[in-house]
Amino acid sequence: MAAPSRSRAERRAHHHDPSPLNSTLDSGSEREGWPMASANSGTSKIRVRFAPSPTGTLHVGGARTALFNWLYARSQGGTFVLRIEDTDQERSSEESHQQILRSLRWLGLDWDEGPEVGGDHGPYVQSQRRARYDAVIAELLDRGIAYRDYSTAEEDEARKLRLTEQGRLTASDWPYRNLSEEQRRRYEAEGHAFTIRIAMPDEGHIRWTDLVHGDMDFDCATLEDWIAVKSDGFPTYNFACVVDDGQMEISHVLRGDDHISNTPRQIHLFRELGLRVPKFGHLPMILGPDKKRLSKRHGAASVEEFREGLWISEAVVNYLALLGWSPGNDREFFTVEEIIKRLSLKRLNHTAAVFDYEKCRYLNGEHLKQMPLSQRVDRSWQVLAEAGVVEADSEEDRERLGRVLTLLGNRFRHFDQSVHHLSAYFADDFPVDPEGATVLEGAGPRLRALAERFAALDPFDAASTEAALRALAEDQGEKAGPYIHPCRYAVTGSTSGPSLFEALELIGQERVVTRLRATAV
RNA sequence: GGCCCCAUCGUCUAGUCAGGUCAGGACACCACCCUUUCAAGGUGGGUACACGGGUUCGAAUCCCGUUGGGGCUACCA
């Protein structure tokens, strides 16, 4: 009989109760947020890990998981471990491995132990830890906790069918659990392929207090025997993960919601292995606009795309943090240091969240505003150079770029706007908005006259150009508008932008006059 | 099918644990002001407690149920 499941609120109310399963890790200081190592009798250190599988790019969801583990380690003076889970020989690739490291570094998430930095618990790539898994599985086999399963594909199929039809499996569905030595030898002799399964208890419950969800309770009768070693000899995720978390002395496992149902299986193994069971915290998923789990088809779903898309990594980190955690007040702009300082376990969200590019972009603009001008100049100059808009760097150009950026102000919110917003100030080949051409209708004579007045100016600056333009309009008995708008379009290629006269000064007399004459033809 | 997670504006959320501003902020949107354009800024606006019961003087908040969304149920992780 299943124990009555407690309501959500009731579980939350018991959020601080020590769980009998992992009482060694209870700190008693969660009321303040993240458990403090110092309150933990001084013996257990905070060790967290991020364990991606190198089967693709670092996904936004993975990045968020990595971020929270990193933030937790940094806020507690703990250790952040990076472990590569490449037990899927088919899908894992070295390229993906490298790309994940690059993405993490770009986000600023440095690891204390892991690939390329080493550590006392290595190696940190699972394919290099085979000997450890083999040793552990040998022991489990020996103790009868694990067993060789010689099921054929047909038997697996049939069992799957029974599971769907009956809702659950019973001991009789695991015919290889208690094979006699003689039978085992026969299968062996006949060279049957086998997997190794972990036998789960037929009854009882596995419970833990989740750092995010509160008390969790799984009825063992609903837990099938699971595969720990595939027929190719490689461990499965659930198995390698437990062995490694144990050997690497991981104290807290913060991962996605999708791992909740793996947790009871893993806890069972931790206990059978006599390992300290880490604390678990399951973060909600990140969704696309259609409320489905975020993926490539939703557009920029990988960190690489943000890096290549010239986003400010701190803004992405800021946004990702807000997607899994709330400061509890109205603040939304945070530097990484501020998040480390404020992050609280109690304020982790438990609801899946839709990734909103608009808001992320807004935050990018906010972070860009905070960036020192010299840095903004560096980055946008680099973008312009890579786009071939500018070539040789000069003090004068950099100084001018700084003035342009300042003039642009809030109009410039993202470095991907560099070519669009800055080209007209530095090159004669700049983007022109074809739809804006209507402002040119009948403006030829005005532009021609304007060009002549501007050509005669000395000095040529915001004040003199404005005076000249307004004088010309008045001479012709016209308003300034019909001069201003065509002029802006002719000189910058756009009908929008900063104050025209400031822009004219920065673009320079020669270019302005040339462009006016060329357009007036 | 079984097990599990989740549920406040379009989106992210505060408020839920200790019932009592008929719900606050942000992004997005609309209007107005400002204005040489576009932004920015200022002002104002609309939009939410999934549904049904119950407990209570009082429910977004507690309880039960329903519905909806998601996850796992892989020799993926």
Image (cartoon, helix red, strand yellow):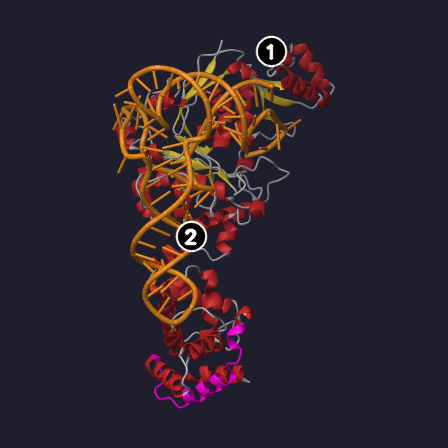
Choose top left, top right, bottom left or bottom right for residue A194. top right
Q: Which residues are magenta?
A: A437-462
Element on which disc 1 rests: helix
Q: Which residue is mark 1?
A: A171
- Assign the magenta stretch its main secondary structure: helix
User: What quarter of the picture does the C terminus of chain A occupy?
Assistant: bottom right
Task: Name which residue lies at 68% across and 21% down.
Answer: A156
Three-letter code for the amino acid on which mark 1 is drawn: Ala
Residue A109 in sight here: no
The alpha-carbon separation of the residues under discs 2 and 1 comes to 52 Å
Q: In the picture shown, does residue A316 fall above or below A455? A: above
Looking at the picture, tell me which residue is in the foreground, A319 or B40.
B40
* Position in image of residue A162 (x %, y %): 66, 16
Note whether A305 is above or below A140 in the view shown: below
Say what secondary structure mark 2 lies in: helix
Q: Please, which chain is the residue tagged with disc 2 on?
A: A
Q: Is residue A29 magenta?
A: no
Query: Camera-side residue: A459 or A91?
Result: A459
Q: Which residue is mark 2?
A: A313
Q: Classify mark 2: residues with Cα within 10 Å, few (<14), some (14-19) or many (20+).
A: some
Query: Residue A182 at what x, y percent from top left?
Result: 68, 10
Judged left or right of residue A495, residue B23 is left
